[in-house]
Image (cartoon, rainbow, N blue to C red):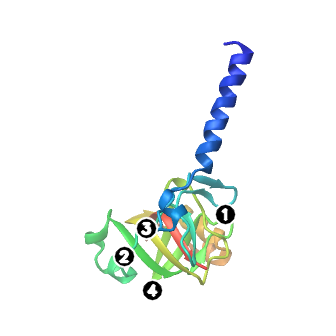
Amino acid sequence: MQPSTLLASASALALVLLAACGSTDASNREGGGQAAVQSRAPIHHPQYGLITAQPVEGWEVYGADVPAGKAVPLADLVANVDAYRGKEVVVEAPIQAACLVKGCWMMFDADGEPMRVKFKDYAFFVPKDSAGRTARVHARFEVKEMSAEQVKHYLEDEGKHDEAALVTGPVQEFTLYATGVRIKE
């Protein structure tokens, strides 16, 4: 392809993309009817990772959208492990702790039982100072055995070095593999 043809093609493509980015939904422009949901291309936040969720007033969003509706209480997950294992759930609870190194996991307290929230495919993270805030999470519920090394690693990430030194064997853990997280502002 000639350099001048390549330049003309690139210029035409740039104009098409510019025009597409500038267009808006007609119902939104005219103010009539319901406000249309405008899709947003996935963004890669330099600190928190891939974010595809639409903004939600009063919440910070991470990862994908979290469905509306009633959340499953954490105590129900723990009390009915066989019914929920492997299932997609929405839960809402206070964050007890978050990874202080990257924000690559957080913890809930399910009536005295710790429940770790990990982020699907390591695609996004949450703020390291999230503890104490409320999170709404869309995730797959699992129960897994963690090796002593994994347990020590997580305790170290949480800054609990003395507790990490006491770990001698594997631990069963309730885990939520989240595709999307909202944290109340």
Q: Which mark is residue 138?
A: 3
Q: Earlier in the sequence, mark 4 or mark 3?
A: 4
Image location (x, y in percent) of residue 54:
53, 63
Q: Is residue 83 left or right of residue 105?
A: left
User: Of marks 3 and 2, which one's residue comes earlier in the chain?
Assistant: 2
For residue 11, which numbered disc appears in the image? none
| Mark 2 or mark 4, whichever is nearer to me | 2
Observer-nearest of 138 and 128: 138
The answer to whether 84 appears left or right of 177 in the picture is left
Q: How many marks?
A: 4
Q: Which residue is mark 4?
A: 112
Circle 1: residue type: Lys
Q: Nearer the viewer, mark 4 or mark 3?
A: 3
Residue that label 2 marks: 69
CA distance separating discs 4 and 3: 21 Å
Quadrant of the rendered structure where residue 175 is?
Answer: bottom left
Q: Is residue 128 above or below residue 21?
A: below
Amino acid on which disc 4 is placed: Gly
Q: Vertically, is 127 above or below 94?
A: above
**Residue sitting nearer the eye, 48 or 161:** 48
Which of the image's four quarters has the N terminus? top right
Q: Which residue, given by chain and number where applicable, does mark 1 sit on?
A: 102
Q: Amino acid at mark 2?
A: Gly
Task: Name the residue located 25 percent from the left edge and 71 percent from the top edge.
Answer: 83
Residue extending farthest top: 2
- Image spot of residue 63 (x, y percent): 53, 61
